[in-house]
Amino acid sequence: MTPRNIIIILIISVFISDCFCQIPVDQPEMPVMYKVTIDPITGYDSIIWYSSTEGLVDYYAVCYSEITNPSQPYILSEPIAMVYPDTVYVNQDTESGTYSLGYSVIAVNVLDENSVVQSVYDYPDSTVYAMAVFDSCEASVTITWNAYNKWKSHIASYRIYQSIDNAPFQVVAIINVEDVTTYEARYVPENSNIGFFVETIHEDSIRSSRSNMVMIYTGMLEVPDFIVGHSANVGTDDNVIIDFTVDPATELSEYKLLRSSDINGNYDTIATFIQHDSRIIFTDNVNYTSGIYYYQLVAINSCNQDIQKSNVINNILLTVTNDGMLNQLSWNPVEDWAGETERYILYRMNMNGTGQTDSILLNTELTHSDDVSLFFEENNSYTGRFCYRIKAIERDNPYTQNSVAYSNEYCVDVTPGIRLPNAFIPNNPGGENSLFQPIFLFQPTDYEMVIFNRWGNKIWEGNVPWDGSANNDPVSEGVYIYQLKVFYPDNTITLTGHITVLYR
């Protein structure tokens, strides 16, 4: 057995038998601790002390204690190192990043191979152990640490160091109150590796002790850079279908849909939902033509906070009034497109049984007068009903392709023109004016005609031209009374008058 092993065994036996309470004549003085500090980069602990009485020290024994509960007494370990003549020891096998460690240094005097004497041990100096907690909802990091135990009442300040993504550490805060051992770093950048450590400054302005470095990754779900509202179109059940696009790079999936009847008014939440697709289409079960509705889609983060909003999108409400041969159209704009309105297209359907639709290119005006007198032709196939729809086209959308939006369809009936002769010749050899029939400028759905004689007796009825007969026999020349009912999709017109029957 080597002398060094003998010395270590003797020191350990002294710890076990509490021999530190004895004070031999050759006992060295207790070393005075200068400081204990941690290198935040390497995690190594440095223990520095003043030398004891010269000539009576053969070794310094460095011991430590795990301080997991500051209210519990320190229990020193067996020596972890034998040091001489240096008064500095660097512990590379440390757990200072897990809890606070308390270090004591004992001076040892070797009397012979069988006996040693040592100084009494002092209350340990503790490392400063820092912890950090990341609050993604507040985008903050809270750092807490224990005060350097041997410097209590002599601590001048604490310095908080921070490094973001391996950048050099910089002081971000100085706390001049000894009892304050917590600091909140607010508005930290998301998805970054952030390191912190605390430096305790002694009131002598010379000594300082650094804590372990604590690393935090500020991982937050990727927030959408944009949410674009495209349109609020009419659905098959006359409800409103709202269309949005969300930044596909987002990691959020919870949204709420807001609605208001005033673009600058109060918005109510009408739905909350989970959606993972970048295209979000929602049906609002309100009647499309009951008003102008404004919608906004809001992304919600994991803290139930509104984190990103779309532009406001609204329905286009078209109204049409008839004034003689003019149909007057008006509509509201899309107020808050991500881009701007480039133009409108007016679609007009002429009800002639072919479903033909005309398109009229408009600029950005919100009204239009449609002259339908051009459709007046005798014996044409038009019904007199005109249906309209507006298409709005966007330009310069900075996020997605340009949007299009459609209004509701609005139909009006132009007052039909009906012409009736006041006489006809059933036996006209040329066939001209040989039938009594109405002439329609706009074709009705159907009509019914009844003929009465001068005494008010019904002699004929039908929905075809009258050939001047009653019960298949020609009527006498004279004046007769007619009653005509004309049926259109939205109204019925009744006309009465006199018709004269002539013969050649």
Image (cartoon, grey):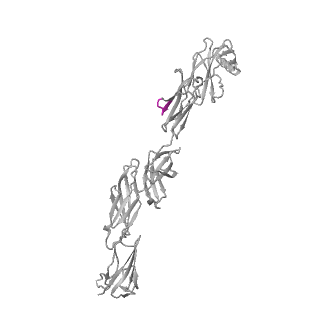
- Outermost residue, right side: 17
Q: Is residue 47 visible?
A: no
Q: Quadrant of residue 466?
A: bottom left
Count of all numbered marks drawn on residues in the image = 0
Q: Position of residue 452 (x, y in %)?
A: 39, 84
Most foreground residue, 253 or 461: 461
User: Does residue 483 sit above or below 42 in this rendering?
Assistant: below
Q: Position of residue 453 (x, y in %)?
A: 38, 85
Q: Quadrant of residue 475?
A: bottom left
Locate the C terminus by quadrant. bottom left
Q: Position of residue 501 (x, y in %)?
A: 32, 85
Locate the N terminus by quadrant. top right
Which span is picked out in magenta? 161-168
Q: Is residue 85 visible?
A: yes
User: Does residue 493 sit above or below 473 in this rendering?
Assistant: above
Left or right: 142 in relation to 426: right
Most foreground residue, 344 or 15: 344
